[in-house]
Image (tube, rainbow, N blue to C red):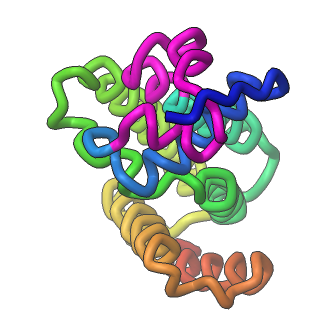
Amino acid sequence: MNLHHDPNTTPQDIIHQAIEVFCQKGYAQTTMKDVTDGLSLSRGPVYYYFKDKYGLYKASYEVFEETITAIHERVFPAPLPAVEKINKLLMEILQDTRKFNRYFFLGLRDIEELSDISQRYDTLNEAFLQRLHGLILEGQSKGELTLSLSKEEITTHIYVVFYGLISAINAKLLAFQSDESFEKMLHRHLSPLLP
């Protein structure tokens, strides 16, 4: 066990290291030692700030939740046409949450200890869905989105595009794409939603 303690190591440093480890190993396979080894830190400060692995995961999840909420609050009210707003939402979510891959959420619904975080995750997703439905209906009423697809069909299209891109990013299939070309690609995938 490494007994070194860097007094400059902050709780945020520990959280960022924990996010990296949870994304590599998932919650169930991560140990506090995995987190502290990456920081050359004894476990004492981690237990001091976060009490246990659950507390550390919860703090890590809160970074994700705060990031997503900030994007929602910034983009949903923006005065943009519907497809541009959807494009901006997806781009910002993809850019700002890249560090949270599927392993970070692995077991979220299956591990009893994480049930409250799972509920928060579901609530966050439900809030996004409700706002997205409002955006779609508003876009359709303004003639910015096609009327040939229902709100549910447009939602499905958006989710398929989004999760397809997330999977490609996680598999490092799009590593060669610049943000600009990635955004153009995303816009092309959303073009069927235009009237």
* x then y, percent, for residue 74: 76, 38
Bounds of the magenta span? Answer: 30-59
Residue sitting at 39 percent across and 25 percent down? 53
| Image position of 101 (left or right of 12) | left
Q: Is residue 73 above or below residue 179?
A: above
Picture quadrant where residue 7 is located? top right
Q: Is residue 194 left or right of residue 9?
A: left
Majority SS type along the magenta span: helix
The residue furthest bottom is 176
Residue 80 in sight here: yes
Residue 18 locus on image (x, y percent): 53, 39
Q: Horizontal and vertical percent for residue 189?
A: 53, 81
Q: Can residue 143 be seen here?
A: no
Depth check: give the residue in front, 15 or 47.
Answer: 47
Which residue is located at x 76 percent, y 76 percent? 179
- Taking depth in this image into account, of 6 and 152 the one nearest to the observer is 6
Quadrant assignment for the C terminus: bottom right
73 displayed left or right of 2: right
Q: Name the quadrant containing residue 92.
A: bottom right
Task: Decide if residue 112 is on the left or right side of residue 108.
Answer: left
Q: Residue at x 49, y 74 (%)?
A: 165
Is 96 within the magenta? no
Q: Is residue 39 magenta?
A: yes
x 37%, y 69%: residue: 160
